[in-house]
Amino acid sequence: MVINIELSPLPLPPSANPSHFIEFGREVHGVDPGNLDPQVFSEIERLLYKHGLLLFRSASLSPEQQYALTRAFDLQTGTYGHGNNLLANQQKSILHPYLKSIPRVPQVQLVGNGVIHNHEGFDEVELKHLARKTLDVSAKAEEDELQFTQFYRWHMDAALYDLSPPRVTTLYGLRIPSGESQVVRYDDGTDEQFKVPLACTAFISTRTTFNALSPSSKSLAVRCSVKYAPHPFEWMAPAKSRNNGLGIESEGLEVPLSELPEWDPSKIKILPMLWKNPITGDLHLQVNPSVLLELIIAPIPASKRAGADGDAVFPDGAHITDLAAARELVYKLQRPSISPEFIYPHAWSEKDLILFHNQGLLHSAVGTLRRDQIRVFHQCHLAASADPAGPTEEDVLKWS
């Protein structure tokens, strides 16, 4: 049975280069995401993996429906991406202040900004926006604090210890703050900056990240695996993010591994740098740069050695255990794709629902808000039933 679903391209800001968004992102029309029959869901699933992000306007979705929709992409799971109620017991995790589990559906998180009342089992709860700074409502803010902002942190939604990275994230906007647009400053040695809607969410396609690499960098990426830290969001909590949100400054501020809560070496995540799209077969350069610990690089296959590029990086393989060196290598691979021309900053409207391929995008919260600017979202992602697939042998031979 052929299912025809009406789609339209996402509206791109002037800063975005349309050539990078030919396949990325679609708005879905005439479909109720809370009530999908199996045939329609199958087509939505295919479209999501093809386009990376699907937008539904004016959606009506209970927490139970949002959980069911998210779980439909992986029926063998049912656990929130960081563990059901796990963050409530991790007071030192950098995520703890920002996520509140909805009591009757703990897989759905309440996120946002400001104090809200009588919401989904909460009599009163204060939400904290994922931002470098929240302005006090009574303070007279400096002019540049209201005009300028930064990316909070480029990441995928994943615990990256014990639990497998979620396939899909659903993000549902219920209350959206009004206000003037702000200018994102990179402050990373470049003069890059661009205008974004207030409190938007920024997305990049990691398929585009890989496709934009040089041949020698593609060879490196297809041979590389990333080892993540145990209890990564507690480990990195004292450290400082780079000004552009792409990873951590190497200042030695991470919690020593010996001082973390007890951890099991068998639960450490070692994942390929490239994750294979289950529908398109494309490769996505999918790394959370804030919590990586080491890089493990395989040698160029023997059958490819004779024709290897003279600029090949680590042709004999390597195990990079120096944290600063590992971070710098990944940073050089990822940094080009967070330039404004590659970013889709979503301007939220009330009842927007976004589904995104969490194993094929990175995203970041953006914006500086006052405490009286209320923002209310429901977020859901579920730990996958298996780790993502990496490059095939044919991929390694093609790109090495």
Image (cartoon, rainbow, N blue to C red):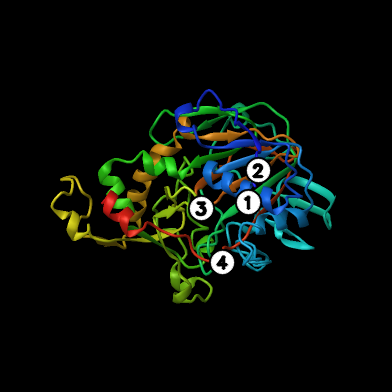
Look at the numbered disc 1 and give the secondary structure of its residue.
helix
How far apart in space, not on screen, are marks 1 and 2 (Cα)? Answer: 9 Å
* Residue beneath disc 1: 42
| In this view, the mark in front (1 or 2) | 2
Look at the numbered disc 4 and give the secondary structure of its residue.
loop
Residue 73 x, y percent position in the rendering: 62, 57
Q: Which mark is residue 359?
A: 3
Look at the numbered disc 2 and give the secondary structure of its residue.
loop
Of marks 3 and 1, which one's residue comes earlier in the chain? 1
Q: Which mark is residue 391?
A: none
- Do the residues bearing badges 4 and 3 touch, measured as CB atoms within 8 Å? no
- Do the residues bearing badges 2 and 4 touch, measured as CB atoms within 8 Å? no
Q: Which mark is residue 3?
A: 2
Which amino acid, mark 4?
A: Ser
| In this view, the mark in front (3 or 1) | 1
Which amino acid, mark 3?
A: Gln
Residue at figure coordinates x 56%, y 66% from the top left: 385
8, above or below 396, in the image: above
Which amino acid, mark 1?
A: Ser
Which image quadrant is residue 269 in?
bottom left
Residue 78 x, y percent position in the rendering: 66, 66
Q: Are there few (<14), some (14-19), or many (20+) residues within 10 Å of tag 1? A: some
Image side of residue 395 versus residue 378, left or right: left
Which image quadrant is residue 227 in?
bottom left
Q: Are there few (<14), some (14-19), or many (20+) residues within 10 Å of tag 4? A: some
Of marks 1 and 4, which one's residue comes earlier in the chain? 1
Residue in front for this viewpoint, 43 or 1: 1
How far apart in space, not on screen, are marks 2 and 4 (Cα)? Answer: 28 Å
Q: Which mark is residue 385?
A: 4
Of marks 3 and 2, which one's residue comes earlier in the chain? 2
